[in-house]
Amino acid sequence: MAEDAGITICLELLNSKVDHKDYQCDHTKWGVDVVKAVGSPRVKLLYDVYHMQIMEGDVIRTIRENIQYIGHFHTGGVPGRHELDETQELNWRTIAQAIADLKFDGYFAHEFVPVKDPMTSLKQAITLCTV
């Protein structure tokens, strides 16, 4: 049905350590295996960098090795899923550049819970990830 409608379905990778206990799709390999089993170009992964940093780390290498299975990205500061700033452990400009270098043309969405002014935090995230 998705193929007929020209819609891409994304299976989101979430962490089962902190936010989503017992979530099945909590590792990139598992999600890639599902996408391969379905065998449709209209089924991809939503690679949530926040969640995969918690579960796997090594996000740039994982993205590079699996970009053909990824249809969408989410951001979020680790720890806490807050702003993409100096309080968290990921280098977002480097991650964004790695994704851009792969010629990714899908969506890269900011999905975090701001603890500061939301619009200022969103502008900061956009600036930081625009490469």
Image: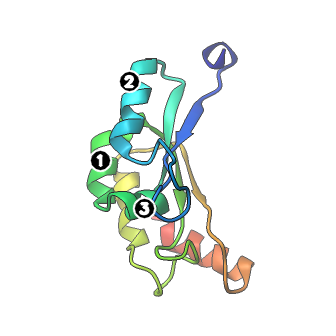
Secondary structure of residue under mark 1: helix
Q: CA distance from mark 2 to mark 3?
A: 25 Å
- The three-letter code of the residue at mark 2 reads Lys
Secondary structure of residue under mark 3: helix
Secondary structure of residue under mark 2: helix
User: In front: mark 2 or mark 3?
Assistant: 2
Mark 3 lies on residue: 96
- The three-letter code of the residue at mark 3 reads Ala
User: Residue at the location (73% across, 85% down)?
Assistant: 117
Residue 15 at x, y = what percent? 47, 56
Residue 19 at x, y = what percent? 55, 62
Q: CA distance from mark 3 to mark 1?
A: 12 Å
Mark 2 lies on residue: 36
Residue 129 is marked as: none
Neighbours of disc 1 within 10 Å: few (<14), some (14-19), many (20+): few
- The three-letter code of the residue at mark 1 reads Arg
User: Residue at the location (56% across, 71% down)?
Assistant: 81
Mark 1 lies on residue: 64
Neighbours of disc 3 within 10 Å: few (<14), some (14-19), many (20+): some
Extreme-front residue of the structure = 22
Dot 3 or dot 1: first in sequence order is: 1
User: In front: mark 3 or mark 1?
Assistant: 1
